[in-house]
Amino acid sequence: MVLVGKTGTGKSSSGNTILGRKAFKSATSSISVTGECRKEAGEVAGRKIIIVDTPGLFDTDLSEEELKEELSKCINMTSPGPHAIILTIELGPFTKEDLQTVKKISVVWVLMGMSNDVGNDELRQVIQQCGRRYHVFDNTKMNDRLQVVDFLDKVEEMVVRNGGECYTNSVYQDVEKRLREKEEELQKHHKKNLEEQKLKLESKFSEEKRKLEDLKVSGEEKERKSKELELLEERKKRVMTEYERYYDEKITESRQEAEQTVFPDTLCNSIILCLNVKYIYIYI
């Protein structure tokens, strides 16, 4: 699920409520505390949940280019596509500012079409276009798990109606292909680095071992040399094991590393995801 909306509508707080923990930094003000897209995962009510929190769209300190970079990362994080786009709106009148925010969001993510009028009719229209899918969260009551279970049931019902498929289009398909290629590239790079480090270490320890073995000693010195050779071998094993652990972790995390890649042609002004409204859910 991807959380979108303007600053101060409770995206991060709602993400925390869903996960049941303070996973995202949040504040009860109109100042954006989410400066970059962030992904968190957890198990809630027997379901594995992945939530991507986004910066307040078009009302943060981020420049337009920085915002596009973050949204590009969001696309990467949710590839091959999210099951639900969650638009957050404050409970109350749907103001002119809210209308302008939704219009601005459509520059990057086309959520839905709206008329030029303002007022509650507009909010009703938005909800109508989303198949009347909406939910009210009280983020001051994270311990109220019933509201979360009810919300997830509604989202799951929507996903089932959509055939269990996530949202995807040519942008997501292209990004998924590039991510896999980048992931493979990173894995090969890390494996190559590991082999190079192993060769260097092998050469280094072999040289140290040779120098010790070349020493002409007898008696107690011979015993000491034997002990030094044992310690050298043990140290070699520890260092090798640490390098293997480090690069194995890098290889395992190649997907996450690839997700931080910003593909240049997804940053142009034509980066528009025409989201089908059947994938959009509103919570207030």
Image (tube, helix red, strand yellow):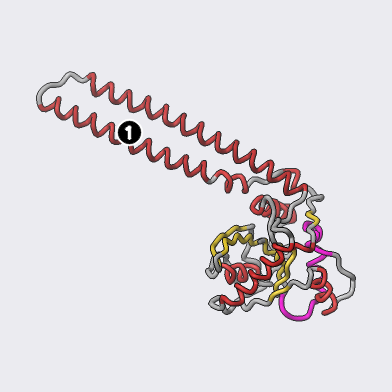
Q: Is residue 108 magenta?
A: yes
- Other-residue count near label 1 (Cα within 10 Å), few / some / many at <14 / 14–19 / ≥20: some
Q: Residue at x 59, y 62 (%)?
A: 49
156 or 216: nearer the eye? 156
Query: Is residue 245 placed above or below 11 in the rendered structure?
Result: above
Residue behind mark 1? 236
Q: Residue at x 90, y 71 (%)?
A: 116
Q: Residue at x 75, y 81 (%)?
A: 92
| Picture quadrant where residue 220 is located | top left
Extreme right residue here? 116
- Amino acid tagged 1: Lys
Q: Name the spot of residue 164 as percent of width and height, x first.
A: 69, 58
197 or 156: nearer the eye? 156
Q: Name the spot of residue 111 as percent of width and height, x first.
A: 79, 62
Label total for image: 1
Query: Is residue 26 placed above or below 92 in the rendered structure?
Result: above
Q: Is residue 126 magenta?
A: no
Query: Is residue 226 placed above or below 17 in the rendered structure?
Result: above
What residue span does the magenta drawing correspond to? 90-112
Dot 1: what SS?
Answer: helix
